[in-house]
Amino acid sequence: MTRTLRLVLLREIPEDQTLRQQWNALVARLDQPQVFYTYEWSLAVQRAYHATLPTLLFLVYDESDTLCGVTALAADVGGSRVSFLCATTGDYCDFLSLPEHKPAFVEVVLEELRKQGIDDLTLTNLPADSSTVAALRNASNQTGYRCFARTAYICAQVSLSKLERRPGENTPALPGKKMLRRSLNAMGREAPVRLDHARSWEEVGPILAEFIQAHVARFLATGRISNMVQYERRQFLEELAKLLSEPGWLVLTRMMSGEKSLAWNYGFQFDGVWFWYQPTFDSDLEKYSPGFCLLAKLIEESADDPAITTVDLGLGAEEYKERFANQTRETLYVTLRRSVVGHAREILRYRTAEIIKSSAWLEQAIRAAVMRMGELREDVGQDGLAATLRRRVKQVAAFFWSKEEIVCFEWVGKIHTDSSVAQLEPLGLNELASAAAQVVDDKGSLAYLLRSASRLRERSAEGFGLIDASRSFLGFGWVAAFDGFFVPELRVKLEAASADCVMIFECMSSVSASNDKYDPEMISHIAARMRDQGKKPWTYGEAYNVALVQGVQNAGFEARYSLVCRRILGRQTIKRNTLRCDHVLPGEVSERV
């Protein structure tokens, strides 16, 4: 049977109109066509991720030279493992062919992969109801692979034909009707809430950046880093929007009140399905559940469109999706290994994970241990084994005996800032979102931004960013009331001499800056802002951090006193020492205590 098929293997997806038409014509003939299966989707992935996802495109033609099978795979750097090219972007991935060609198509692809020296295949998000599943099991036996499949996701869906409608009402009976009405009224005080759909690139282009920023800001607000901070992900969404808007499959929906955007969904309309792909909302409106409201209005609008049969809510088991769903679709995580040991290890790993998940405390303990091991490997990779061991030993020894000292500095009016070079602006979630895209490859900076987002939500401090003419962040800093300020290094709260004293803390230079020259300027700008508000600026730093002490002094601060913390067997004592104000230099502080 395989002899009747002609296989063509390409190392990239050609930008060819004929192939595009043939590919999409094949997709249209499938039992359950998906926008993720289209030529446009794979091409957008290749354009955005070509540096990290080398393409393996398999095209299979029958005796009449008609395209009857397509699958786009991606190889790893070593070239011995492959996965679906669209695995990290598409909610459904598959071998594309009609059922009558599927067994032969899958077998000829696996045979070619074996000849290419591919030992491992990881196929994620494969629909469990696809004929590919059986074809993979059968073909793996013929080609020397061992197949193992497990559940990946249960995708929630809304079948519009199954929705109930109350007597005398045109809109479907959806959950949370009263809450929805209250929330829409609250968000629509200035103007009625409506849905706005951008479908062409001319409409999508101007608002795509707004959507991306809102998504990154929303993730920061929940203590996470959005994948949209990565340049490749942003490029993918842009390329995808350009490609899918041409045939009319893209729908970037905004829920709006007047000209204000409340929530977004980067989605698609394809073959009767409206896809809930990448939603987000303005975190300032969280109490009104804007995401829930957007989905409810989108389902109501879909129910009135005879061309739409299903709203697919995609991957993820969020609670709000389950409230709307009236059917599901399962996807699988399928591995094919040539090694018996590798196959057995895959099964053992899965069975062990299932056992661990059955116990909440055990799962939590294992996750914590894995996280600590990951941090240890990262430290060893960055600093080396010897330096990491010395630091760990020092941490353990600190329980038995340690001494730490911080110095508190008061501003004395020697402030020199140049507003033509950089300006100080208050930090909000949107500003943190913009900054995250600048420091995406620096884990320390991303951790700083997550802490900053937490402070914004808690309203425990006021943040500022130093921004240059190109709107790039040069530095960040925070201000809080001095009285009661908690010093994490000593685990102690400070007392202020007067109520108008404020503490400037956690001033950080952006990694995009060429050096640390903006540290003193960052502190100076914030001190100037506090002075203009009638406040008395203070800051603090570790006594032995020579660079920090010198930077603080250069910014116009003078040392007033130090706090020395001694710990013996976990017991802590704090001693305050007054310092002379004249000519305090880095390295001299500890000698004067």
Image: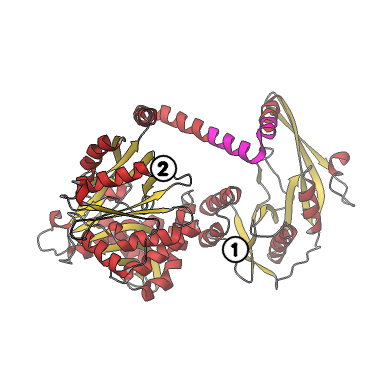
Looking at the figure, which quarter contains the C terminus?
A: top right
| Nearer the camera: disc 2 or disc 1 | 2
Most foreground residue, 424 or 226: 226
Relative placement, left or right, of 277 versus 438 is left
Is residue 378 part of the magenta span, yes or no?
Answer: yes
Secondary structure beneath dot 2 equals strand
Could you say where residue 570 lies in the image, as x and y percent from the top left? 67, 26
Could you say where residue 70 lies in the image, as x and y percent from the top left? 28, 55
Against 351, is 334 above or below? below
Q: Residues within 10 Å of mark 2 (few under 14, many from 20)?
A: some
The numbered dot on residue 81 is 2
Q: Which amino acid does label 1 sit on?
A: Pro
Most foreground residue, 141 or 402: 141
Q: Which of marks 2 and 1 is nearer the N terminus?
A: 2
Q: Which amino acid does label 2 sit on?
A: Arg
Could you say where residue 101 lies in the image, as x and y percent from the top left? 18, 50
Magenta residues, start to end: 373-390
The numbered dot on residue 426 is 1
Q: Quadrant of residue 244?
A: bottom left
Is residue 521 part of the magenta span, yes or no?
Answer: no
